[in-house]
Image: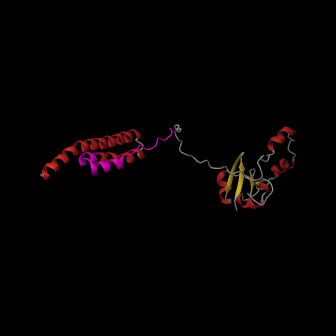
């Protein structure tokens, strides 16, 4: 059975019965458990009587009997109010605090720029110029064209643009060299036939 205790205005709980004395529970403390309506002073709560075994009353000697029969002085109403323990003003149901969760603080997010589209890879032109024009220059164009997408998806947009432009430039160079070589190839072919 779990108990809640109010000891010197501080609420503890839920705890087992055996743990109450370790918290500093006295007979003037208040306790509560499920099934009872209100906080109860420990001295009036029979369930916890075994926590405070009754001490034997000392025998009253004849001299002390005289003083025992005398009426004690009446306390003033203010002193009486101070000596009487007041039950704590705590809700009937015990409050269990919610353990806070800690999250890693996040850096403020930068406003995102609109994502630029991927520049053209020019791979088709590089392959065609390799097959139809100048193979050496076409292969260089293919190498640059193959790196455009990987640079773009790595977030290096400027490098992707540069590789796209170089792939286009080497494709054009391959076409130019191929067109310049074509008349010489035709003439060489005709001369070799005669």
Residue 136 horizontal side relative to residue 20, left or right: left
Identify the colour scheme used: secondary structure
Q: Identify which residue, 31 or 27, lies in the foreground.
A: 31
- Residue at horizontal 81%, vertical 56%? 37
- Residue at horizontal 43%, vertical 44%? 118
Magenta residues?
Answer: 112-140
Quadrant location of residue 148?
Answer: top left
Residue 166 in sight:
yes
Q: Residue extending furthest left?
A: 194
Q: Residue extending furthest front?
A: 194
Measured as percent of width and height from the top left, residue 159 is found at 37, 40
Q: Identify which residue, 139 or 100, lies in the foreground.
A: 139
Measured as percent of width and height from the top left, residue 181 is found at 21, 44
Residue 108 horizontal side relative to residue 132, left or right: right
- Whether residue 147 appears in magenta in the rendering, the answer is no
Q: Identify which residue, 59 or 115, lies in the foreground.
A: 115
Q: How many marks?
A: 0
Measured as percent of width and height from the top left, residue 59 is found at 78, 56
Measured as percent of width and height from the top left, residue 138 is found at 28, 47
Image quadrant holding the N terminus, namely: bottom right
Q: Identify which residue, 170 or 151, lies in the foreground.
A: 170
Measured along the vertical axis of the image, is residue 170 above or below residue 194?
above
Residue 20 in sight:
no
- Whether residue 113 appears in magenta in the rendering, the answer is yes
């Amino acid at each position: 059975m779990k108990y809640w205790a109010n000891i010197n205005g501080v609420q503890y709980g839920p705890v087992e019965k055996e743990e109450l004395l370790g918290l500093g529970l006295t007979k003037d403390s208040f306790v509560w458990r499920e099934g009872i309506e209100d906080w109860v002073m420990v001295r009036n709560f029979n369930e916890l009587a075994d926590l405070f075994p009754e001490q034997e009353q000392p025998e009253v000697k004849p001299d002390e009997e005289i003083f025992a029969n005398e009426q004690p002085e009446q306390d003033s109403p203010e002193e009486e109010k101070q000596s009487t323990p007041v039950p704590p003003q705590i809700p009937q149901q015990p409050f269990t605090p919610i353990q806070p969760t800690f999250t890693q603080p996040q850096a403020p997010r930068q406003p995102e720029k609109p994502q630029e589209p991927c520049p053209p890879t020019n791979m088709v032109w590089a392959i065609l110029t390799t097959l139809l024009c100048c193979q050496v220059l076409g292969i260089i164009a293919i190498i640059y064209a193959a790196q455009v997408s990987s640079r773009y998806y790595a977030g290096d947009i400027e490098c992707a643009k540069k590789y796209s432009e170089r792939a286009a430039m080497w494709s054009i160079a391959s076409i130019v060299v191929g067109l310049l070589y074509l008349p010489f190839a035709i003439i060489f072919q005709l001369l070799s036939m005669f």
